[in-house]
Image: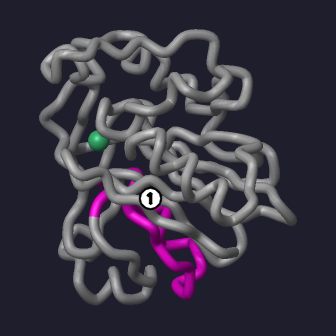
């Protein structure tokens, strides 16, 4: 799957635009500015079919309001955080983001719109990873050599440790596209990441 990456200037957050078919794209974590996202879509002749939120932190959802709520998907356990500026931390950034009426996915894992999701609480209570073809979008659950912090609202280090076990049963050739930083293979992460040992 061809994946375009936009890095937000302010927060170093990765917004991914994945080409899912002819002229079709899915956006993962629209934290980059909307003009840039629109630019990538236009340049590549794509239209956004769906938007997935790996979790609800402000730096991953800044541009989400530009999309129809009906095409946005997040995990049900993230609902309160997505609707509450003090929890998604947008209130501290002077914006106050509260997304309403988006689609909430239930269960520990499954498929939505051809993407596999796995609920991986820990960084926040409703974090999920998203997998399609050879791509794994890990949000702030897994980075190359570390994991997401667990000291923010709904964070829980014990749950994160448990969630990291899901990577054991996944194909190690998957390319991991993290919420921050460069992509890497899951195999590489097992060599570099203390938290996966
Ligand atoms: Zn986060």
x, y percent for residue 170? 57, 73
| Residue 123 in view (yes/no) | no
Q: Nearer the viewer, residue 59 or 41?
A: 41
Q: Residue 6 is drawn in which quadrant?
A: bottom left
Number of numbered discs on residues? 1
Pointer 1 local density, CA inside 10 Å: few below 14, some 14–19, many at least 20? many
| SS of the residue under disc 1 | strand
Q: Residue 131 is drawn in which quadrant?
A: bottom right
Q: Nearer the viewer, residue 58 or 95?
A: 95
Quadrant containing ligand 1 reads top left
Q: Is residue 93 above or below residue 188?
A: above
Residue position for label 1: 138
Colour scheme: one colour
Q: Is residue 151 above or below residue 154?
A: below
With 197 as the anchor, is 23 left or right in this view?
right
Q: Is residue 172 above or below residue 8?
A: below
With 152 as the anchor, is 57 left or right in this view?
right
Image quarter hosting the N terminus: bottom right
With 108 as the anchor, is 146 left or right in this view?
left
With 60 as the anchor, is 54 left or right in this view?
right
Is residue 171 found inside the magenta-colored segment of the image?
A: yes
The magenta span reads 161-180
x, y percent for residue 55? 43, 37
Is residue 183 found inside the magenta-colored segment of the image?
A: no
| Residue 124 in view (yes/no) | yes
Q: Residue at x 24, y 55 (%)?
A: 12
Q: Residue at x 25, y 21 (%)?
A: 90
Q: Residue at x 19, y 46 (%)?
A: 10
x, y percent for residue 92? 13, 19
Image quarter hosting the C terminus: bottom left
Q: Residue 20 is drawn in which quadrant?
A: bottom right
Q: Residue at x 31, y 48 (%)?
A: 160
């Amino acid at each position: 799957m061809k994946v375009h990456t936009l890095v937000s200037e302010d927060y170093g957050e990765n917004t991914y635009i994945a080409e899912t078919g002819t002229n079709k794209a899915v956006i993962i974590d629209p934290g980059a500015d909307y003009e840039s996202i629109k630019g990538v879509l236009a340049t590549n002749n794509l239209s956004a079919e769906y938007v997935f939120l790996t979790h609800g932190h402000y730096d991953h959802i800044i541009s989400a309001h530009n999309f129809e709520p009906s095409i946005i998907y997040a995990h049900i356990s993230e609902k309160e955080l997505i609707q509450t500026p003090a929890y998604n931390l947008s209130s501290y950034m002077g914006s106050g983001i509260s997304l309403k009426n988006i689609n909430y996915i239930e269960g520990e894992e499954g498929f939505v719109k051809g993407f596999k999701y796995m609920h991986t609480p820990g960084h926040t209570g409703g974090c999920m990873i998203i997998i399609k073809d050879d791509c794994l979008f890990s949000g702030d659950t897994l980075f190359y050599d570390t994991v997401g912090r667990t000291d923010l609202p709904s964070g829980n280090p014990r749950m994160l440790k448990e969630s990291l076990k899901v990577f054991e049963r996944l194909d190690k050739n998957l390319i991991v596209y993290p919420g921050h930083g460069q992509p890497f293979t899951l195999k590489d992460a097992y060599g570099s990441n203390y938290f996966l040992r």
